[in-house]
Image (spheres, rainbow, N blue to C red):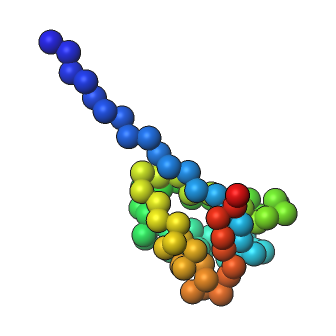
Amino acid sequence: MSLNLFRMNNMVEVFKTNVQKGQQADTLIIELHQHFPDAKINFDLDDCDRILRIEGLYILADSVMRLLQDNGFKCRILE
């Protein structure tokens, strides 16, 4: 007898931000993890677009953008 297991694929969302400092990014990551506890979240502040990358099962892009905007940062989906 075989058992089929369904594997959920992670979503990946990439955002352009204006976060400048590592300390700012660290604070935002902590706050983002409160909303997306199982997600992998990181910033690439060396990139000209100050990339925020989030990988997880459920990512609500509007919530991510609102959270950054509520903290005084610009954020939009990178196309």
Any part of residue 43 in sight:
no
The answer to whether residue 20 is left or right of residue 60 is: right
Q: Is residue 78 above or below residue 10?
A: below
Where residue 7 appears, x then y in whole percent?
A: 36, 35
Q: Is residue 35 above or below residue 47?
A: below
Where residue 72 appears, x then y in whole percent?
A: 65, 87
Q: Residue at x 47, y 52 (%)?
A: 56
Q: Residue at x 47, y 45 (%)?
A: 10
- Which of the 4 quarters of the picture holds residue 34? bottom left
The answer to whether residue 77 is left or right of residue 67 is: right
The answer to whether residue 57 is left or right of residue 4 is: right
Residue at the far top: name it: 1
Q: Is residue 57 above or below residue 72?
A: above
Q: Is residue 68 above or below residue 16?
A: below
Any part of residue 71 in sight:
yes
Label count reads: 0
Where residue 76 appears, x then y in whole percent?
A: 66, 70
User: Which quarter of the image is occupied by the N terminus?
Assistant: top left
Q: Residue at x 58, y 56 (%)?
A: 13
Q: Residue at x 64, y 58 (%)?
A: 14
Q: Nearer the viewer, residue 79 or 14?
A: 79
User: Which quarter of the image is occupied by the C terminus?
Assistant: bottom right
Where residue 38 appears, x then y in whole percent?
A: 42, 55
Residue at the far left: name it: 1
